Image: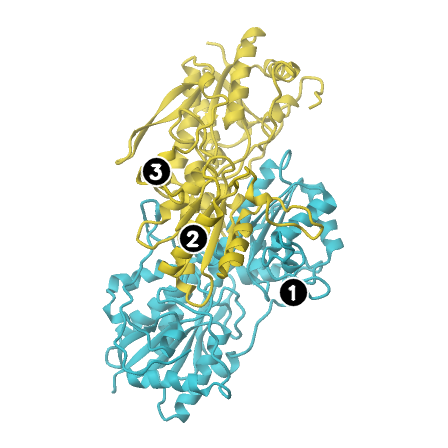
Chain colours: A yellow, B cyan
Amino acid sequence: MTVKNAFYAQSGGVTAVINASAAGVIETARQHGDKIGKVYAGRNGIIGALTEDLIDTSLESAEDIARLKHTPSGAFGSCRYKLKSLDTHREQYERLIEVFRAHDIGYFFYNGGGDSADTCYKIAQLSEKMGYPIQAIHVPKTVDNDLPITDCCPGFGSVAKYVATSIREAGYDVASMAKTSTKVFILEVMGRHAGWITAACGLAAEQEGEGPHILLFPEVEFDEAAFLAKVKATVEKYDHCVIGVSEGIKNKDGQFLSETGLKDAFGHAQLGGVAPTIAQLVKDKLGYKYHWAVADYLQRAARHIASKTDVEQAYALGRAAVEMAMDGKNSVMPAIRRLSDAPYRWDIAEAPLSQVANVEKFMPRDFITEDGFHITEACRRYLSPLIAGEDYPPFKNGLPDYVRLQNLAVAKKLPEFKL
Amino acid sequence: MTVKNAFYAQSGGVTAVINASAAGVIETARQHGDKIGKVYAGRNGIIGALTEDLIDTSLESAEDIARLKHTPSGAFGSCRYKLKSLDTHREQYERLIEVFRAHDIGYFFYNGGGDSADTCYKIAQLSEKMGYPIQAIHVPKTVDNDLPITDCCPGFGSVAKYVATSIREAGYDVASMAKTSTKVFILEVMGRHAGWITAACGLAAEQEGEGPHILLFPEVEFDEAAFLAKVKATVEKYDHCVIGVSEGIKNKDGQFLSETGLKDAFGHAQLGGVAPTIAQLVKDKLGYKYHWAVADYLQRAARHIASKTDVEQAYALGRAAVEMAMDGKNSVMPAIRRLSDAPYRWDIAEAPLSQVANVEKFMPRDFITEDGFHITEACRRYLSPLIAGEDYPPFKNGLPDYVRLQNLAVAKKLPEFKL
């Protein structure tokens, strides 16, 4: 059997568990020395492949690779760099294959969301045509939870656990102060197109009266009057109102609310921050004292409160990707398959990249209540297992002890390539 | 020995561990049945005493009282209601003593910050004069860490651990994406007057290049030019810059920065949110891509990542308050006394309320670096032990399992009192 090297890269927004997938890939590859030589990682994702800036992961100790399982962010660097169309920028794809050829790379593991699935698919197709066949396997990752076929996406479960925990805690806080202080609390969460993270906030409301009382999904057009009526009714009933809002909610004109509200001192629209816009609306129209929080990167980086299920799945998908490669598979993605809700059981199936690339999965309408302001029981059944279990990182000096790899470069063999 | 009832109330902004102090008070009181009858809690703090809305904590099970140790927020409700001056509103104080007399209350445990220490002190003085002596003991609590005499304040250590953990995690995230995405990340934290929480962010920077790279303290006048130069230098050196900013920073005119930047659609100043103001400044002047987060209540409610040291001290101070009362003390506050930094050792001393009321403790200047943008080694030595140790709450369905007490009311005996 020929031994080939492997290439691994992280793509797009990083998560609390993408490094667990990296550990799954690297540890499993190390167990297959008969087929896989070294695992090279792209420094800053696919850019590292284009610029031949490769990291030799074989120089990292087994201990440090294991520590990736509890370290958030992208250990090798990630990037937001979408390869252009194959028709107009064929040279980018050819360059990738040239780099793979120069470094004797036979396996391409690409860890990302929809865009990277598409890139992975194109690489597999083109490499075949160029006479240097690469086995391209996509490892799913996205906090947006919007990849098709797979039941859920690594990274999402941990964000879900973080936002549900945080909004529960803030809800307890607000409830205990509402008599004389804040009545309305608003937490803004990620999810520009799909409301999965907003939905996860809803898990915190388990008992009558417990927040969040209102969720604002990007899938539901923002109806100001209905929203204000709901806030008023909630405050009148429970003395306070806790709201989870997606950064991506839009008004009836299809405009992002975050772009309609605030202006800076020069009159320019302030980008981002739908929470303050909603807060101001509540204040202006209902007069309630408010507070708001914007979790931003805190939510996707919060490894300290990661979901154990999510960590396990992220690792298992990395491992499965290598195992699929060892089985001779190409142009596929290992996907989570749900076998039952309760008890939660899952395994890993094989998804053809042709069916993954360029397909987005949105929240089913029956996951949102009829009034559009909360999640249904069906949604709870889906979400609950994904936040199950804790998997705390080790702590040192009172803080999570995350690994920083050496990330030593592989010597270059090719002329420079301009991005 | 006469048996008297006790009154306990929570005051001001709640914390992740104020309920641990409540548990310390109630559990210890239950061990002194020879002197303490029931512990009544004020519903919504001191307002509950004024309106004779008392909660009978003796109806709560030992198990539920124990669960307070891991439950954030104020279990009996808290309030922002400062009693007026004794000269102008003597009737409020007289009413309190009338309620205490009606319910045979001989012990007053008031759990709060500077204002409540002042109230506690006045009650002790007046009750003596009115011929119904009450032993008034103050139990310290404030995330602002600004009470005098005590080495630290319960609630602060847990916020400190939360913000340091969160900014480390976000820092890792930003560092791994900086090549093509966000260069500057800003986390806004609490602390309108004192920079203790902002300082705690600094603990996350342990290794060369690790964020936060810049801290903006309320004690240091915001110097736009120096700040921008520091951001630029940091991005040029490390490719990214992580910033922790206090909500209370002011410009050279003494104006809160949060009030200078944003205006809503009607041209009104937008309250709160210094992070977006700083972000916009960085964007306008340096052109860097940015992200920002506002932790708001999330930070003070984050019991899931509480400091073990903080939880232990909060409980110990509640216990000590009752023990001081049993020793016949009056008009005092149990205070944390630091015996050594490393290993960290502490005990509890007795502080006279006359020296606590109306005194605020600010950050020593030598805790802030000369350039005003970070913390010194002296500050680290002070802060480090306060975030030491984890004390995770139990989880159920993937979420922290916090207690909700029954909070049953005691029958009223007096005529109504208008607030």
Residue B219: image tag? 1
Q: Is residue B213 left or right of residue A143?
A: right
Marks 3 and 2, how far apart at CA: 25 Å
Which structural element holds mark 2?
A: helix
Which residue position holds label 2?
A229
| Front-most of residues B351 and A238 | A238
SS at badge 1: loop
Q: What numbered label is drawn on residue A379? A: 3
- Chain ID at mark 3: A
- Location of the N terminus of chain B by quadrant is bottom left
Q: Identify the residue at image location x=52%, y=63%.
A: B341
Q: State whether residue A193 is above or below residue B233.
A: above
Horizontal and vertical percent position of residue A66? 45, 34
The answer to whether residue B390 is visible is no
Residue found at the far front of this picture: A225
Q: Which chain is mark 1 on?
A: B
Q: Disc 1 marks which amino acid?
A: Glu
Q: Position of residue A321 (x, y in %)?
A: 43, 22
- Which amino acid does the dot numbered 3 rest on? Cys
Under tag 3, what secondary structure?
A: helix
Q: Nearer the viewer, residue B311 or B102?
A: B102
For the residue carrying disc 2, how many other residues have a C-alpha within 10 Å: few (<14), some (14-19), or many (20+)? few
